[in-house]
Image (cartoon, helix red, strand yellow):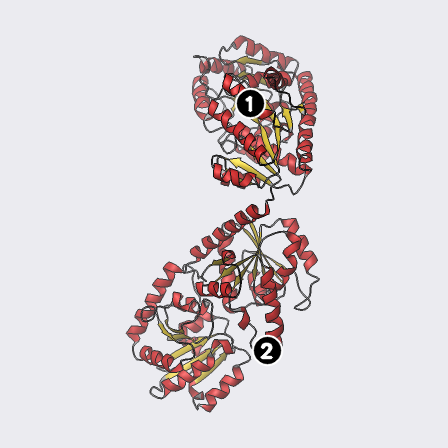
Amino acid sequence: MKVLHLISGGDKGGAKTHVFTLLMSLQENIDVTVICFMDGVFYREIQNMPIKSILIKQKYRNDLTIIKPLIKHIIENRYNIIHSHGARANFISMFLKNRVKIPILTTVHSDYKLDFTENLYKKYIYTGINILALKFIDYYIAVSNNFKNMLVDRGFKKDNIYTVYNTIDFEKTVNFIGKKEFCFKYAINADDKILVGIIGRFDQVKGHSVFINAAYEVLKTNKNILFILAGEGPEENNLRQLAKKLKIENNIIFTGFIEDIFSFINAIDINVLTSYSESFPYVLLEGALMKKATISTAVGGVTDLIKDGETGFLAESGDYEQIAKKIINFAENKELRDIIGINLYEYAKIRFSRESMKFRHLEIYNNILEIEKANNKNFDVVLSGYYGFDNSGDDALLKAVVDSLRAEKENIKILVLSKKPSQTMEEHNVFAINRHNFFQIFKYLKMCRVFIYGGGSLIQDITSTKSIVYYITLLKIAKKYGLKLMIYGNGIGPIIKKKNIERVQKSLVLCDYISLREPESLNELNRLGINVKKTALSVDPAFVIEPKEASHVLEYENIRADKNYFCVNLRSWRYNEPNFTDKIAKLIKMQIEKNFIPIYIAMHPSDYNILKEVITKVNSRHILLSKVYDIGTLMSIIKESKFIVAMRLHSLIYAISVGVPAIGLAYDPKVSFFLEYAHQKTYVSTKDIDIKLLNNMIDDILENYAEKVKLIKERASYLKSLSEKDSKIAISLLD
């Protein structure tokens, strides 16, 4: 998942802390990038963090020349979600809404109607613009349930609003200076005095005048208390005048803006918040981290953290007399301060941790993507096959079909039915659902345009009737929902049971196009009397896959260019002859005597059992690949060998594709069918292994090696051209 975060770049205080904490935690699980629009405090600080950050600088607040480069960046990087923070970012997001077709989410950090109260121009212009921008955004995160209710009351759609409380990293190491050093730095004479502190921007909404009036009440009975105000803002002069008017200026200290908030909180004895409106203020969480006794007005989400008399004291907003009584109570009882501070720390650590915020955001992102896909009906094709079973061959088919479709239509939207949807999504960058969840399948098929069986031997009953019923049922459902149907490079048959023949006859005639991977499948269609007008002979889709650079793997597996290798792939099969492993071991020994080294390849985890059994019987120098490698790597390994002796179809396909002669052990007719199609008559049935015949085939290959390789490459080139036509046909069905 790729999520782009947008923020002005000049944010301070709680919003900055929130976004820093969020980005640091999210980048552990997903790909996150943040774009800022000004070179401010936020942007400068994030440069020192391991988070991808970009500055697309505005010349002035409403500069829209940045929209074009921003859109270009979003499209090129294929983000899944845009997450906005703050009024400026919301304003920019409004212009992205209909241009990038990506869901936009914003976190509402505060009451947006009170964000610009310090200036009449900003209050009416910026607040109005932000209200308008919020209406264009798709989804919202409120930082408390109170804020969610506020948004609902103001007409925002309830189902599009999520709640995530602000959190703080209780595991991080907090650096701060000592109380004496802090007081010296800010010229505070704190000798044996109780320090009561408040930190925040000096705006009317923060209620600093309430704090000063409470101080006046406290100082009537206790002169041994200093009241520290940390911050800056338009109300500062009025607050200084109020302290002077009340004649308490000697006990009121203005420190100015404090960047090192934890040094401030460490120095004070009582942490106070007197706001008229809040979401879920970070200053209380920061106080909780420092185990500080806290007094706050009961506004916004504060009451979810501060439980009166347990984790702090609460007061009604504006009630300075009530706040004064709470301060006196704390000031006269250090033991109470310590107990409440510890209670607050323990409560916050359990309920407002960094991890809880991270996983809640991931849950929201996934939910949004689910909703968007459901609402937009934006899948071009749905791919069905034997996907998600940890089988290299079937994974190769999925990769081949996906890559081929994207080569024809870059932004094609693909849905895959898989046994392991999460794994399939991660490996192939597609959206996937569980192939056995028919409730989901019914839901999502309605959102698709073309249904494709992407390779494999799906329409056959030699495995089981259950399998063939599953696949033809999907065809019928897809057709019922109006999708075009395509069989893409499939093998057909054998179909033995009479009832299954009837089922296949009724379902395959519904197809708009059928391409088959070898002539025998076409013969099977004719035998069944199935006549689909648009039917063509093609090849297995895996033929289009190219080897990838794998020198590090070759080095790791100790495969050297100066050695003679041949590859061996085996699988357990109930119809193998009784002496199968003995005969294969003998054949391998014969090749070792010719100075060849076997490389044993597993294409499914289950292959290791039979490979190890044969290795034990051969008891000679060998290489057993340490794991089931991806398709491109396997092809590169096979390319290093002189020839391959193999059972699994796709190991043979990989070999022919890269020009390596192949000896097939035909446990299934599809193996012999493919080799015949590739003009290679080098195979025997696993029911009756003829070692002498196999060895003669290998000798014939080695004696005429250059000519054999040339013919294989020519045939492979032709077969690849057939497969490339299939992707063009599939895309044409979308029109």
Circle nearer the viewer, 2 or 1: 1
- Against 104, residue 182 (above or below) is below
Q: Residue at x 38, y 63 (%)?
A: 348
Instruction: Tell me: 691 left or right of 220.
Output: right
Mark 2: give few (<14), some (14-19) or many (20+) Cα within 10 Å: few
Query: In the drawing, what numbered circle is on residue 119?
Result: 2
Q: Amino acid at mark 1?
A: Val
- Against 630, residue 573 (above or below) is above
Q: Amino acid at mark 2?
A: Asn
Q: Are circles 2 and 1 on residues that touch, CB within 8 Å?
A: no
**Which badge, 2 or 1, comes first in the chain's sequence?**
2
Viewer-side residue, 19 vs 186: 19
Q: CA distance from mark 2 to mark 1?
A: 75 Å
Secondary structure state at the residue bearing disc 1? helix
Query: In the drawing, what numbered circle is on residue 504?
Result: 1
- Against 363, residue 319 (above or below) is below
Viewer-side residue, 558 vs 97: 97
**Could you say where residue 25 lies in the image, as x and y percent from the top left?**
48, 55
Viewer-side residue, 394 vs 686: 394
